[in-house]
Image (tube, rainbow, N blue to C red):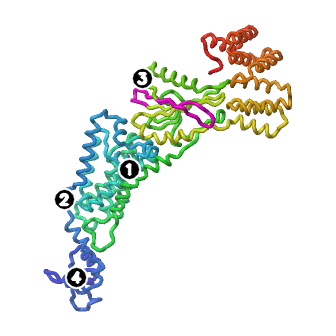
Amino acid sequence: MAPVIWIRTDEGELPLSLAEFESSVRAGRIAPSTLVRFPILTGDRWVEARDLEVFWRLYEPARIYFSRAFSLGSLPIVTLTLGAVCGLLFLVTRTKTADVDNLLRYGAKAPSAIFEAGQTWRLFTANLLHRDPLHLAFNVLFLVNVGGTLENAYRTRDFVLIIVASALCTTLLSALMSDAPSVGASGIVLGLFGAASLFGQKYRDILPNRLKRYLLWAVLPYSIFVLYVGLATEDTDNWGHLGGLLGGSLATLFLTPELLLVDGRKRFPSGIVLAALLLLPLAAAPAIVRFRPPMATFTDATSGLAVLYPETWTFGEDALGFPAFGNALGVTMGIRIRAENRPIRAEALERELLRELASREDSGEISSVQVGQRSPFSRDGAKGVELVARLESRGGRVHVRGFLFARGQFGYMVVLSTREAWAAAYAPLFERIVLAIRVEETAALRAARALASAFPGMSSAHVELGDALAAVGDVDGAGRAFQLALSTLPDNGGALRGLARLSADYGGDLEAARRIADDLRALHPDDISLVLLLADIELARGKQDSARVVLEDALDRNPEAAEVRERIRLLGVGSKLADP
């Protein structure tokens, strides 16, 4: 191509094509004072390059200065400080048992603690902890290697922004995608790799050749290799690595190297963004404690119990062997529901829980049990107690709050437990769960109400309603339902039996109840339920011997009656049959 531009140098006049002229201006080889002849614009005249508009469209002093002045000579204080902090924390954590629980105590990533207990500071601290010396050594080595380059390229606040964005995205993406605890600065390292690759690609035409080769042909392939190795191993936090890579790269997109900053031009507000990234997660903690996590509802239609629990909790067993919902930290909500044929008292549930604790202690699963505060508890007509205990187990001390309450023939045990390390953090969530405990109408009672409403003249419908009301301890309502059934059908055996049972279970005219039971048994001598009713009435009257006679007479008639035999056995050991 014929030359279109001439420049005058010390060696003489040099012809250039338009492309050569443009690259020479961008590279700074043509200064503003260089004499130029551009026949299309200047004819035969020689003028200084600064007099040509095309020159100013191409000439960028900052880029030229950057290509000449950029070096790695400055000591990377931030990078070295970060590496030192990682090393110091490793020494501190190594003074304790080097296990997962210890790392969790010092700030490892724990999604449950972050999203349930509001410990958002873990989004940062998890990046500073390490499992073992090799883990620490590799991360600090790569951190210093690539971090030093970027710290020399960007302002301190900009470089810190890259680090914080990498750390935050590392833990956040990992916490959202994986429940496993994790630690390490590898996410920050991947973030710096991404930032360095982007920096090298964006400014490849003005970087020194040595740095250009390093940033373009070493950093990016190594980042890809690290991600690949992570995918090939089970214990690598791949989501964290990916999050760090994305966070560091995204932050770098908006930043300009320090040597290219031009006074007077609008700059990216890295200081404001950095403050936001640091403060917003911490400021969100109170809102998480108050409004999160999203809750699901456990509902038992038979007993009417409804309890909230975090929807991310999974079903299993708690430390006492109760069916429970819990998380990866061992925080659990155990639920046990008892349904009997007679009213249940909260004292019986309390004894049951204490027996359960004692059996665990005897088996060696719990080394000691310390029962603490006992206070009244009630909910929707169900009454009971709250029992606080501390257990010394193989995994450490466990805090237990048991809510033991009963309504009619249903007994409820809701047991909240957590290791001591998490007790304070989970106290607000536990309180939220406790406040939301409900004892609703049972499915049987809803069905009975609907039936009685649909068929008000049907005696059996009112008997069914009375039985359902008696089961939930509504004595007055049950009595009215049975009386309504008798007004429709005066000799309704179910209604008469129901009234007698109410007297035996909840107190009333026991003599009248005894007469009703005797009359019904005369009609149905082989009905075991009537035998048990008669025995309960005698016990309610304080006549244990009479109750035994009733039971033994029935057993003589029917030796296969297991329920009767069990009642006799309980009488023999002095149990109160009316107080299960």
Amino acid carrying label 3: it is Ser
Is label 3 or label 1 in front?
3
- Between 67 and 541, the one nearer to me in the picture: 541
| Residue 518 left/right relative to 217 | right
Amino acid carrying label 2: it is Ser
> Label 2: how many residues lie within 10 Å, few (<14), some (14-19) or many (20+)?
few
Judging from the image, what secondary structure is the residue with disc 3 in?
Answer: strand
Q: Residue 15: which disc?
A: 4
Q: Report, in whole angstroms, how far the alpha carbon at label 4 lies from the one at label 1.
A: 54 Å
Q: Report, in whole angstroms, how far the alpha carbon at label 1 lies from the one at label 2.
A: 28 Å
Query: Is 111 included in the stretch rendered in magenta?
Result: no
**Cβ–Cβ under 8 Å for marks 4 and 2:** no
Residue 111 lies, with reference to residue 411, above or below; the image says below
Q: Residue 170: which disc?
A: 1
Residues in magenta, as a range:
373-398
Look at 45% across and 42% down and name the residue there: 112
The percent coordinates of residue 174 (x first, y second) are 41, 47
The percent coordinates of residue 55 (x first, y second) are 27, 81
Judging from the image, what secondary structure is the residue with disc 4 in?
Answer: strand
Q: Visible in this render: residue 220? A: no
Say which residue label 2 marks: 74
Residue 131 lies, with reference to residue 346, above or below; the image says below
**Cβ–Cβ under 8 Å for marks 1 and 2:** no
- Between 64 and 566, the one nearer to me in the picture: 566
Q: Report, in whole angstroms, how far the alpha carbon at label 4 lies from the one at label 2.
A: 41 Å
Q: In the rendered structure, which disc, 4 or 1, sits on the residue that comes first in sequence? A: 4
Q: In the rendered structure, which disc, 3 or 2, sits on the residue that comes first in sequence? A: 2
**Cβ–Cβ under 8 Å for marks 3 and 4:** no
Amino acid carrying label 4: it is Pro
Q: In the rendered structure, which disc, 1 or 2, sits on the residue that comes first in sequence? A: 2
